[in-house]
Image: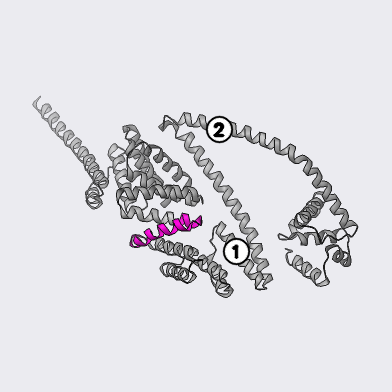
Amino acid sequence: MRKIYLILFVFLLLLQASCDNRTGIFKALQRADSLLVADNDSTAAIIFYQIPAPADTSDETALYNYVSAKINARNYEPQTPELLDLPIEFFKKEGDLRHLAYAYNYKSIFLLSYSHDISNAYIYNKEAEEIANNINDDILKFNINTIGYTISAYHADTDECLQYADKAYRIGEHLHDKTRMAYPALYLTLCYDEKNIADSAQKYMAVCLNFIDCYDMGSKAAVYTAFGNSMRKKNPAFAEQYFMQSLEVIHNADAFKGLTRLYLEQGNLDKATEYYPKALRKDAHESNVELMSLYAQCLEKAGKTDAAFNVYKDISSEKDSLYKTKESNLVLRWENINKFYHTQKKDFKELENKLLWIKNLTIFLTVALLAVLAVFYFKTRKPTEIKVSKAENLYQRLLTNESISQLTKDERDILVEYYFSQNADFEREISTNYDKLPTNSIILLILQNIGKSKTEIMDIMGFSDQAYRSLKSRTDRAKK
């Protein structure tokens, strides 16, 4: 009997020791977390790296993964996003909204930096933002606004970028935190520069120059480029200096773009041509179209019509890519919002009301849209009939060899559109065998198709022999 008591006693001692060890690990993790909250990162890291990684899927493992994520996020070290799934479930179970919001935010950070998963980063950051609206935690809100800016920048939504950057900057000001003011100031500078609001851009640029030592290489270059853009018209020499300073830090398309635009505005086509190929962003962007248009106009003025024509063809292709990119982003953003509100509703009691509001708004907008379309249809039906009648008259002028040299561009477009509607095979032939053609080239091909001679074509279009040969040459070059 005594042996049994002794064995039970030893077992209880071992069990207690085991419990004390687990409690000790959990308390050590809590201690490291509290030091991180107090911005005592070095001491927190020392404590954390002395803690053995738990082997099971217990609460200790959840807290261990969370503290690890927090340290890695502070040190800009990427981490597998899935490691935060266990902490998220743990904090949900505990009802710890503050830590849950941080876990969501850290997961959005690693989804961006580790997986480049914009869609899910958006969703988890929105989860964190929903909770943060009811919690007084400036650091959490700063993190959320910073990630929000990054995601909005990916979607090329300058207005939303501006909102997130402004919120982050105001938090940095409130905390008197130089680092947390520096990057939002840069974001604000870039946003106002994008919107061509020079006074506001220069205001935050002055802040950026005060914080220049806080930035990494890419951010320093962005500050100098933004300064060059704002000074381009006021002081071109000063702007050129800042663009060059940006390129000394790191070669970047925005600085090359600024220099190209600067030289084009000064009429220095040779220097502009030197920087132009490096200035175009790899992704489709409105600034590419703007710069390409300016470059093509300068080439035309310089008499380099062939080069200008090639740039105009590139502009058409860039616009198509830009449209597809914008369309894709809009679809992606709507899918993200839809997924957020439908899959995460169990975490927020108010979500059902929001969904009902969205549903009612959708119904209202649908009804309103149908009403507008109905009004538009009845208003445009008659003008459409007039347009068809006009197109028939214009086509009769071709058949009877009447001159069309005085027709406006719109009238020429109507004529082409009418002919295509009557000759679908010819339209397919044009689109298949030629790159995008200007209206005059298409009319030339139409006249050839209906059997008009060279002399008749020259009379109808009001062309000299040289103008006819030039147009025919350009049209032939566009053939695939």
Q: Position of residue 154 (x, y in %)?
A: 49, 51
Which quadrant is the N terminus positioned in?
top left
Q: Main secondary structure of the magenta part?
A: helix
233 vs 432: above or below = below
Q: Is residue 284 visible?
A: no
Q: Amino acid at mark 1?
A: Met
Secondary structure of residue under mark 1: helix
- Disc 1: which residue: 292
Identify the magenta region: 190-214
Q: Residue at x 59, y 48 (%)?
A: 327
What crowding class fits label 2: few (fewer than 14 Cα within 10 Å), some (14-19), or many (20 or more)? Answer: few
Q: Residue furthest right?
A: 400
Q: Position of residue 294 (x, y in %)?
A: 60, 65
Out of 181 and 145, give the one closest to the viewer. Answer: 181
> Which of the two discs, 2 and 1, labels the residue nearer the N terminus?
1
- Disc 2: which residue: 361
Secondary structure of residue under mark 2: helix
Which quadrant is the C terminus positioned in?
bottom right
Q: Amino acid at mark 2?
A: Leu
Does residue 479 show up magenta in the picture?
Answer: no
Quarter of image, res 122: top left
